Image: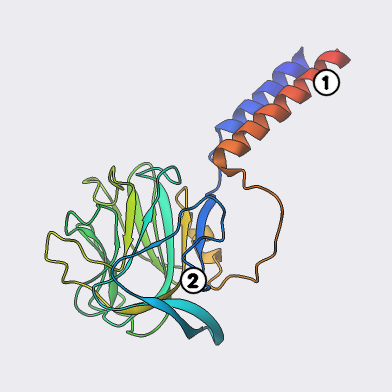
Amino acid sequence: MNRLAALVSIVTVFVALPLSAIEVADFRFEDTLSSSVPGAPNLGSLGGGGFVDTTVDATSVRGWAFPTATGLDLDVTGMVSSDVYSVVMLFEAQQVVGYAKLLDTQDRAIDQGLYYVGNDLHFYGGTGGSSDGIVAGTYYQVVVTRDIAGNYIGYVDGAQEFSFTDSSSYAVITAANRLVFFRDDLSTGDGENTAGTVVRIRLFDNALSPGEVAALDRLPAPLVAVDVPALGRTGILTLVALMAVAALAVLRRQS
């Protein structure tokens, strides 16, 4: 019985530990707006754009070129919590000095959101970076994370640009369950936009740590077909529970 109690304690602690962020979508723009991770819906085009050849890190890749006042959107229903997520975007923008909206979580209803402004990454309604290092026409990997406590952090190429506490919930995804990329909100006339090219967008169901952000690759490795279904967070917890039940059954037979 002591062994049983010890095993139950170990399993309980393991299940209670926060799991690392799971990638729930990876859009690579290889002549498709679908995700290489199964289960995610397709990206939607907001008014224009198309696939192009481009070069990132001395590598020829495909991307999605978006004219000014267009963009993409994604229905994230069932993929992430509204207040806990990470978004990773590898793209170049043609406008980085005046406000150019990059990510909107509020169904385009309010002005607050993620922008380039003054050669920096900035969250209007929160805070912004001060490096003045963003250059138009250059590919950067921009990452934003929001955790359950409301901590919102923005990164450029693995380095933290800003952080703040999202006490006003401007970065919480609304009930529309919609992320909008590279398209301004309607409340200010849809005028703060940029043209550009995106080659990769990823979505994670938890807040990546600074170490995990720094370790992210930029361009994907070649795809390898693996006939194993994605478990997801719920599947992993279910598998752990089943393993615990099986282990307890074995111990009972030995006692």
Residue 163, horizontal then vertical, whole percent: 32, 58
* SS for callout 1: helix
Residue 5, horizontal then vertical, whole percent: 70, 17
Task: Examine the image and state in which quarter residue 102 appears.
Answer: bottom left
Of residues 167 and 26, the one nearer the viewer is: 26
Residue 49, horizontal then vertical, whole percent: 35, 75
Give the mark nearer the N terminus: 2 vs 1: 2
Classify 10 Å Cα crowding around label 2: few (below 14), some (14-19), many (20 and above). Answer: many
Is residue 92 visible in the rendered structure shown here? no
Task: Examine the image and state in which quarter residue 118 appears.
Answer: bottom left
Of residues 57 and 48, the one nearer the viewer is: 48
Q: In this view, does 229 lie to the left or right of 105?
A: right
* SS for callout 2: loop
Residue 100, horizontal then vertical, whole percent: 24, 72
Question: Which residue bears the numbered disc 1?
Answer: 250
**Residue 28, numbered label:** none
Residue occupying the far left of the picture: 188
- Total marks drawn? 2
Quadrant housing the N terminus? top right
Query: What type is the residue that disc 1 sits on?
Result: Val
Query: What type is the residue that disc 2 sits on?
Result: Phe
Distance CA(mark 2)–CA(mark 1): 49 Å
Classify 10 Å Cα crowding around label 1: few (below 14), some (14-19), many (20 and above). Answer: few
Select label 2 or label 1 by which is in front: 2
Residue 124 against residue 38 in the figure, above or below: below
Question: Which residue bears the numbered disc 2?
Answer: 29
Is residue 24 visible in the rendered structure shown here? yes
Q: Is residue 154 left or right of residue 15?
A: left
Of residues 148 and 50, the one nearer the viewer is: 50
Q: Is residue 68 left or right of residue 214?
A: left
**Residue under the point 51% across and 79% down:** 62
